[in-house]
Amino acid sequence: MLPYYEKKDNDIHVRRSKRIGCAKHLHGHIELAIMLKGRTLAYADNNGGILCEAHAFISFPNQVHYFSDDFGDCDNVLFIFPSNKISAFNRIFSKKLPLQSIVGIDLEKILPIINIALDAEQNKGAFYETIVENALSIILAHIFERMKLEDVKKRNISAIQSILLYCSEHYNEDITLEKIAENTHMSKYYISHIFSKEIGISMPEYINTLRIRDAEMLLQKGDMSITDVAFAVGFNSLRSFNRHFFAQTGKTPRQIRNSDKNE
């Protein structure tokens, strides 16, 4: 799973679900996951571990984070929100980072507050935003009383965002370090450093991962031939596409296409 930059709106979102898995990504919002039952893997900037019952995980703005469904179904509640919606904690979100992204909580105490937020989100009454904001403030206060935080130096987040956003919009083209540098106004050597140190993979590998992710979705739709899919996502040969596809998925494009038909 490799990181990508995700655009978000300015609303608070809350949902309860059995699955929480997602690829590595970053954005300017906070993600707060509360595990009611079961467990999952949760990481923010390589800080995390197993998120189990009566524990919470939080990702601060522009941390590369992800969840894994390796343990199967779980019962979780996920809040996604911009820091300006919960102004009481602006200083924490802008100046601090958790020493550990996962912390134990008193689930019996805050579960009624969580349910208030879920009910307000579902019913969408006249004051649901106010209700959710206040419920979330109480939950965050409960969590930060238990979580150790540290001061952090400002990261060059805008550079990472610019690079990942450009890649997400142009991965199906003939993309190179030189083109990324020209369009983001950065040195290609600095961009290469960002990929190796912040993202943990080379630029070509990252681009090919985006292409394969897109290819899987196109193959599952079944509207295009495998050859057309290969060229549509940016590969210049079917052989190269097949090689990278198998390396990343463990299956051939035809197996993905056929498995979807058999379901």
Image (cartoon, rainbow, N blue to C red):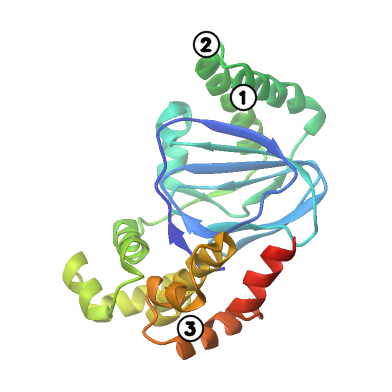
Foreground tag (1 vs 2): 2
Q: Nearer the viewer, mark 3 or mark 1?
A: 3
Among the two numbered marks 3 and 1 on one chain, the one whose residue lies closer to the N terminus: 1
Q: Mark 1: which secondary structure?
A: helix
Is residue 236 toward the left or the right of residue 148 in the image?
A: left
Give coordinates of residue 76: x percent, y percent.
73, 41
As drawn, the label of residue 241 is: 3
Q: Residue furthest top?
A: 126
What secondary structure is found at the residue carrying circle 3? helix
Image position of 233 with respect to 51: above or below: below
Residue toward you, 5 or 131:
5
First in sequence: mark 1 vs mark 2: 2
Asked if residue 252 is positioned above or below residue 12 in the image, the reply reads: below
| Residue type (three-letter) at the residue carrying disc 1 | Ile
Quick one: label 3, few (<14), some, or many (20+) residues within 10 Å? many
Q: Amino acid at mark 3?
A: Phe
In what quadrant of the picture does the C terminus appear? bottom right
Residue in view at x 59 percent, y 55 percent: 99
Q: Which residue is mark 1?
A: 138
Instruction: Find residue 39 and name its label.
Output: none
Callout 2, which amino acid? Phe
- Mark number displayed over residue 127: 2
Neighbour tally class for label 1: few under 14, some 14-19, many 20 plus, Cα within 10 Å? few
- Measured from the top left, where is residue 6 in percent x and y? 43, 52
| Image position, residue 1 (x, y; %) | 57, 68
